[in-house]
Amino acid sequence: MVCSSSRGPDVKDDERSTTAPYYIETAGEVALFEQCHHRKLAVMLKGPTGCGKTRFVEYMAWRLKRTLVTISCHDDLSTADLVGRFLIGTDGTAWHDGPLTRAVREGAICYLDEVVEARQDTVVVLHPLSDHRRMLPIDKTGETVIAAPGFQLVVSYNPGYQRMLKDMKPSTRQRFVAFDFDFPPPEREAAIVAHEGGVDASVAHALVTLGNRLRQLRDRGLAEVPSTRLLIAAARLIGSGIAVQDACYAAIVSPLSDEPVLIGAMRDLVAASFI
Ligand SMILES: Nc1ncnc2c1ncn2[C@@H]1O[C@H](COP(=O)(O)OP(=O)(O)O)[C@@H](O)[C@H]1O
Ligand SMILES: [Mg+2]
């Protein structure tokens, strides 16, 4: 019988939308992903937070005309949260598929965001799905579900994050084709910031220049560097009338550090980037 975990899965099902999600390609990743999809290969997206991994999967699901099931991983996530569980209802106890099982049956793209956050014993359930077997054995019911055509497993992983503490087991990582993501080159990042942030090209350019200068502070101890997402947040504030310095402080500088010396250095770079 059953059981519920304290947090349960954080799941989002995207029905195929008619308009393409906005995505600017950087290095041939679209064709590579398409081949992986057609050849039934599981995919791992590696890269820092906020650099476009989720948007890329949304775009590819749209392009390949597949439903996208997104599962945000965390350390309380259990196998039952992914696969399913027996639940007591008015007519007695009945089995309920979890989001992974649903994606396997329906032939959806199943995206496990931040997969290293999940415990190793949870992740092993992915193994028979990520090799040629393409099947999901459900221990609790005795059923083995064979993946419908179109099913694809995609995981994301931030290699810089809590390195050493958390890493993927070699036996897991070797089941995936890896895509290396990073912040887009400046002109493309500026186009993205202008589009998503609703600012003109000159403001977008200045924000990207600032972002790249701030990224160099990594060598001076800035643990988290600004992502494309943070630059977009600053752009949105500027677009809605907040003064540039205030917007950059609130959306970029302050979220990145509590350290007075680093904050001072970042403020100076903001001042130098918008004159
Ligand atoms: N190549 C790209 N094309 C279009 N938008 C992008 C791209 N890269 C980043 N973005 C923008 O940056 C935001 C953050 O990206 P996201 O995909 O959520 O990052 P991640 O999943 O890597 O943490 C997106 O919502 C999108 O607005
Ligand atoms: Mg993401």
Image: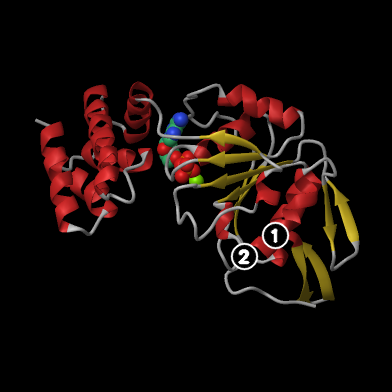
Identified by mark 1, the residue type is Leu
Quarter occupied by residue 88: bottom right
Q: Are marks 2 and 1 in contact (CB under 8 Å)?
A: yes
Secondary structure of the residue carrying numbered label 1: helix
Secondary structure of the residue carrying numbered label 2: loop
Residue 25 horizontal side relative to residue 236, left or right: right
Q: Position of residue 81 (x, y in %)?
A: 68, 64
Count all numbered tags in the image, as a single digit.
2
Residue at 77 percent across and 64 percent down: it is: 96
Residue 22 horizontal side relative to residue 1, left or right: left
Q: Which mark is residue 82?
A: 1
Residue marked by disc 2 = 77
Q: Position of residue 133 (x, y in %)?
A: 85, 44
Whether residue 222 is visible to the viewer of this picture, yes or no, is yes
Q: Which is nearer the eye, 46 or 9? A: 46
Q: Position of residue 143 (x, y in %)?
A: 90, 59
Residue 130 horizontal side relative to residue 241, left or right: right
